[in-house]
Image: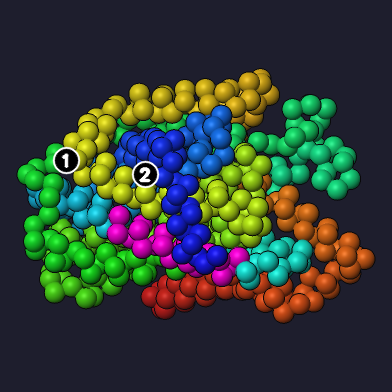
Amino acid sequence: MTTFDFLLHGLSVAMDPMILFYALIGVTLGTAVGVLPGIGPALTVALLLPVTYGLDPAGSLIMFAGIYYGGMYGGSTTSILLNTPGESASIVTALEGNKMARAGRGGPALATAAIGSFVAGLLATLALAFLAPYVVKLALVFGPREYFALMMLAFVTVSAAFGDSAMKGLTSLFVGLALALVGIDQLTGQARLSFGVPELLDGVEVTTLAVALFAIGEALFVASQGNTGVDKIEAVKGSVWMTRSDWARSWKPWLRGTLIGFPIGAMPAGGAEIGTLLSYATERRLSKNPEEFGHGAIEGVAGPEAANNASAAGTLVPLLTLGLPTSATAAIMLAGFQQFGLQPGPLLFATSPDLVWGLIASLLIANVMLLVLNLPLVGLWVKLLTIPRHWLYAGILLFATLGTIGMNPSPVELGMLLIFGIMGFMMRLYGYPIAPVVVGLILGPMAEQQLRRALAISQGDWTTLVATPVSAGILLVATLALVVPLIMRMRGQGAVLSQIASDED
């Protein structure tokens, strides 16, 4: 069967009435929570992760993907109307979008963001469908040492990409790797770091950690900041629809944003914020009205928002084909797969083709649903922004606690939720990134298993890790990804010191 045949089969799976219902619930929940200020897609997905726990795997994962896409859509509403980006990738949208809203053009700004997200999501999902089989064919020839090298690349790039300091990123990663050691050894069957607590024999629950770090930690951090002022809600004045001039100025940025965002999202050290910044710079350079930038240029909303959503689909390429998360949201999605005993990777395409292709096809349908939901219901989403912050974060704490109890009604689990929530608060307080902890807990056991298999095959010879060009090349790239930013940072600090010295002279 060709990729086109697989995609048609996936559409037949996704068109099942129950699957459509799950997708509709997912996009509605994702948009509603994503619209709320300060709540980005990663927190949205982590918070709603327990909702999918009791459902069947296919329906819940499709609902999960809808939550992911809905959270990405919802973030633009907060950025445009409140100038409060829910995540770093929405910062660029706020630059021009909020200026348009203050000038009474919030409707066209929201419309170009929604339609641009739809166009980018549609094209990027089709690219995902046609690119994934080739990545899978490449991954099927990988052995234990190649997979271990891939895990090392994921560890290094995630640690280096998140946070202000590579050292803080690595510290967060090692916290996650330490938590991954808790439980029964996969090869020997011996209990490790369980301290006689039976609930710890199965290891630390990824869902509990994700909800605690992202939801509980964020709520505690916001509460610690106190009342820093009331956000002013910008009303959507006039029509939501775009004029003919708006359409003419938006369609090319939509396409350019898709072309920029998708490949960057698929890179191990990519990230949506890089794509949005590149898209904004490109539109500013190519615009016929560069003087409007900084005062509400519609191209500055259309391009970055398309790049943002295209990168969201791009992150699914390494996630589904290799099992490697390249963003915080992708790490939470990986936890969603694992809560059903599924491991994304090349074998998933062979063992569960209905699930994989149904999921990819449902993303196409979810994009249509999101466009239909977002344009007519802008007024409803704006009203959600009026929820007082103390009620909002109290609701998050309640929802996270009830979700954890629903999944595992255990005092130990609730204790871990509290401990990890406090840990997430402290990490935010001192500037340590959260995502590497989750990545370390998820990928740590797999990296350990592949390393021990490779050493068992080679009878303990460590040189086997670089015995093939593929594994050696991946480990070299991982080393460069760690060393090059450190050298550049040191050279930058040296230049600053020399400049200070010359100024004193």
**Which SS type dominates the magenta stretch?**
helix
Q: Are marks 2 and 1 in contact (CB under 8 Å)?
A: no
Task: Name which residue lies at 40% across and 28% down.
Answer: 393
Q: Position of residue 498 (x, y in %)?
A: 47, 76
The residue identified by callout 1 is 234
Looking at the image, tell me whether mark 2 or mark 1 is earlier in sequence order: 2
Q: Give the number of the mark in front: 2 or 1.
A: 2
Query: For residue 163, which numbered disc appears in the image?
Result: none
- Choose between 185 and 195: the one closer to the eye: 185
Q: Quadrant of residue 26?
A: top left
Would you say residue 129 sits in the magenta stretch?
Answer: yes
The residue identified by callout 2 is 70
Give SS at disc 1. Answer: loop
Q: Tell me the quadrant of the picture where the N terminus can be found.
A: bottom right
- Choose between 158 and 298: the one closer to the eye: 298
**What segment carries the magenta color?**
118-136
Number of numbered discs present? 2
Q: Is residue 323 visible?
A: no
Q: Amino acid at mark 1?
A: Glu
